[in-house]
């Protein structure tokens, strides 16, 4: 399990199998706790820490951020107490997902600090996958804060890394972010190019992988250009996929898109619903 932990997390996460991932790590965590007789062992056991991080990751994906924060913080503390050569992949992973939790809770600076810490460790480890993931989230925070020039540089670096290592899932996510940024800047042709490539990769990977990211942003692009019928269809399709995976945060974003379309179409009752 030590050898495959990171791959197991990524397997469930990149497929958007959040319920399955949460169930797997919950069962493993319960079973491992039963094996630890001494109270002090449960405080420092590296495997328990890994499993807590895993359960925390999928608690976050299911929108259970309070529980996720407790699990990830406890897991990270225990991992930090291990020898430096232990759990080298899990420490930056825990920091990265704890950053996502803080981002959802609106703690942007704390989230950015955690992503920066994860980024530094991933660079030391020469882990291009982890570097690109951290850069993408730092870019997203800068985007939300209106620092568009910085966000552009970071997302471009993430795109180049993900292309170079063949990370198709990550590439689709970064293309969606790049499209969202271009849309915000009114660069509609650039947005369309990025989002169409994202959609093509999504189709190759399968519906539960990254399709909702591209669909929703294509919906916003259609909404921005006055194609409300097309926008409603994109948001509806994205909503169905996000409801299937149990990603409550993205379900809310899909509903906001449908609300915007209803408002522009003059259907106030539908918007309120």
Image: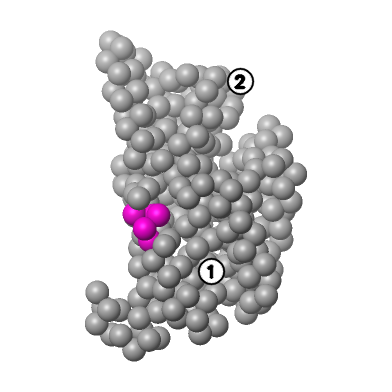
Asked where in the image residue 221 lies, by quadrant, the reply is bottom right
User: At numbered mark 2, what does the secondary structure look like: helix, strand or loop?
Assistant: loop
Q: For the residues marked 2 and 1, what is the alpha-carbon distance in whole angstroms? A: 44 Å
Above or below residue 212? Residue 10 is above
Look at 43% across and 61% down and name the residue there.
238
Residue 135, image x, y percentages = 63, 51
Mark 1 lies on residue: 218
In the foreground, 211 or 69 = 211
Asked where in the image residue 44 lies, by quadrant, the reply is top left
Residue 41, image x, y percentages = 35, 15
Look at 36% across and 29% down and name the residue there.
25
Quadrant containing the C terminus in the rendered view: bottom left
In magenta, the rendered stretch is 239-243
Asked where in the image residue 70 lies, by quadrant, the reply is top left
Name the residue at the bottom extreme: 266
Q: Identify the mark at residue 85; answer none if there is no mark.
A: 2
Above or below residue 19? Residue 45 is above
Report the coloring of the rendering.
one colour
Residue 207 makes an appearance in the image:
yes
Above or below residue 69? Residue 81 is above
Residue 117 makes an appearance in the image:
no
Does 207 sit left or right of 179 as displayed?
left
């Amino acid at each position: 399990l030590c050898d495959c932990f990171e791959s197991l997390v990524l397997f469930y996460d990149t497929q958007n199998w959040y319920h399955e991932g949460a169930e797997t790590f919950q069962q493993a965590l319960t079973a491992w706790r039963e094996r630890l007789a001494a109270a002090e062992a449960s405080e420092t056991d590296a495997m328990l820490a890994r499993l807590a991080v895993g359960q925390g990751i999928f608690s976050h994906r299911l929108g259970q951020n309070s529980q996720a924060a407790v699990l990830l913080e406890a897991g990270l503390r225990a991992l930090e107490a291990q020898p430096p050569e232990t759990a080298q992949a899990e420490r930056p992973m825990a920091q990265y997902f704890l950053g996502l939790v803080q981002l959802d809770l609106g703690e942007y600076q704390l989230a950015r600090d955690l992503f920066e810490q994860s980024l530094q460790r991933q660079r030391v480890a020469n882990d291009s996958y982890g570097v690109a993931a951290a850069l993408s989230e730092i870019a997203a925070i800068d985007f939300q804060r209106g620092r568009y020039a910085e966000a552009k540089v970071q997302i471009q670096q993430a795109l180049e890394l993900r292309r170079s290592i063949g990370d198709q899932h990550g590439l689709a996510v970064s293309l969606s972010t790049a499209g969202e940024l271009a849309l915000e800047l009114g660069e509609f042709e650039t947005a369309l190019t990025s989002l169409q490539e994202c959609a093509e990769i999504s189709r190759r990977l399968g519906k539960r992988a990254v399709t909702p990211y591209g669909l929703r942003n294509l919906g916003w692009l259609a909404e921005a250009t006055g194609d409300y019928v097309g926008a409603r269809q994109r948001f509806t399709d994205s909503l169905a996929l996000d409801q299937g995976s149990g990603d409550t945060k993205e379900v809310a974003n899909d509903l906001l898109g449908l609300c915007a379309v209803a408002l522009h179409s003059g259907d106030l009752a539908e918007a309120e619903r």
